């Protein structure tokens, strides 16, 4: 059994308008997942540097970033970061380039954790429904083109407000959705913008939204999590 989580950390800017990376890390520690997909993990302008300083991860957490960065000061790709346990083995990793009007991307890695090998994709999809569907097709095509088949977890901020249509219907052809619950807006969650999906050779044992006091102020999204049997 492994635990995964997805969190749009909103560049560590909380509802109090303070940027506080250490508060973000405290939320992640509360969840204590084996693999975490972060969105909006880089600053938006300038050098697009990581919001969380690498030394904070190294010195104060049990995670390391998957090395898919394309910029010297970033931890990921277009704000998408995968964190894994320090004792996990990263067997392969790469960014996925997505069609978009504004910079968008996804990250993919094959990770051996707790003796199991799993493929993980972290993503942050477009605000436009048309572009979301194009991006979903690109991600699924990329995964389908991999020579090695593995149990696969996809997670991130899909920006999909509908419950069963759009890109959700596209992903549902090959993946099951964890019933995490609404995660946006953190102050009053009504929308399931954040999703965890698993291929049908894996089983979702439990899932939920992490709604601690810290999580309710650290970002405009709440983190979601799932326990998965491979």
Image (cartoon, rainbow, N blue to C red):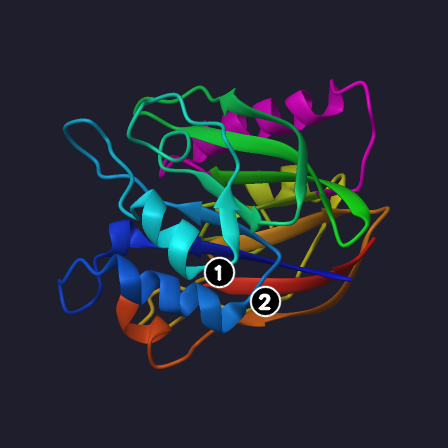
In the rendered image, residue 127, in percent from the top left (x then y), is placed at: 35, 39
Q: Is residue 219 magenta?
A: no
- Please give the residue where the numbered disc 2 appears in the rendered image: 180
Q: Is residue 146 magenta?
A: yes
Residue 192 numbered tag = 1
Spot the residue most to the right. Answer: 201
Does 212 sit left or right of 197 as displayed? left
Compared to residue 155, the image places residue 139 above or below, namely: above
Does 78 sit left or right of 86 as displayed? left
Looking at the picture, tell me which residue is in the foreground, 125 or 35. Answer: 35
Residue under the point 35% across and 44% down: 54
Q: Quadrant of the N terminus?
A: bottom right
Residue under the point 66% across and 46% down: 88
Does 194 sit left or right of 4 as displayed? left
Spot the residue most to the bottom. Answer: 213
Tell me which numbered mark, 2 or 1, is placed earlier along the sequence: 2
Closer to viewer: mark 2 or mark 1: 2
Q: Which residues are magenta?
A: 124-152
Q: Are marks 2 and 1 in contact (CB under 8 Å)?
A: yes
Tag 2's secondary structure? loop
Q: Decide: few, some or many residues near mark 2? Use Cα within 10 Å; few <14, some 14-19, many ≥20.
A: some
């Amino acid at each position: 059994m492994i635990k995964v989580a997805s969190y749009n950390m909103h560049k560590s800017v909380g509802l109090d308008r303070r940027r506080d990376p250490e508060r973000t890390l405290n939320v992640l520690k509360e969840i204590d997942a084996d693999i975490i997909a972060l969105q909006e993990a880089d600053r938006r302008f300038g050098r697009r540097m990581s919001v969380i300083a690498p030394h904070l991860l190294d010195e104060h957490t049990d995670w390391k970033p998957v090395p898919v960065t394309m910029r010297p000061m970033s931890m990921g790709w277009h704000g998408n970061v995968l964190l894994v346990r320090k004792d996990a083995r990263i067997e392969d990793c790469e960014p996925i380039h997505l069609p978009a009007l504004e910079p968008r991307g996804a990250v993919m890695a094959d990770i051996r954790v707790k003796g199991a090998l799993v493929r993980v994709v972290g993503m942050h999809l477009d605000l436009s429904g048309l572009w979301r569907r194009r991006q979903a097709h690109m991600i699924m095509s990329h995964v389908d083109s991999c020579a090695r088949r593995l149990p696969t977890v996809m997670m991130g901020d899909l920006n999909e407000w509908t419950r069963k249509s759009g890109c959700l219907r596209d992903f549902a052809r090959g993946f099951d959705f964890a019933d995490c619950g609404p995660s946006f807006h953190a102050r009053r969650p009504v929308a399931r913008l954040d999703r965890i999906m698993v291929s049908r050779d894996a089983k979702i044992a439990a899932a939920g939204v992490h709604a601690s006091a810290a999580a309710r102020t650290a970002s405009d999204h709440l983190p979601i999590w799932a326990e998965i049997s491979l």
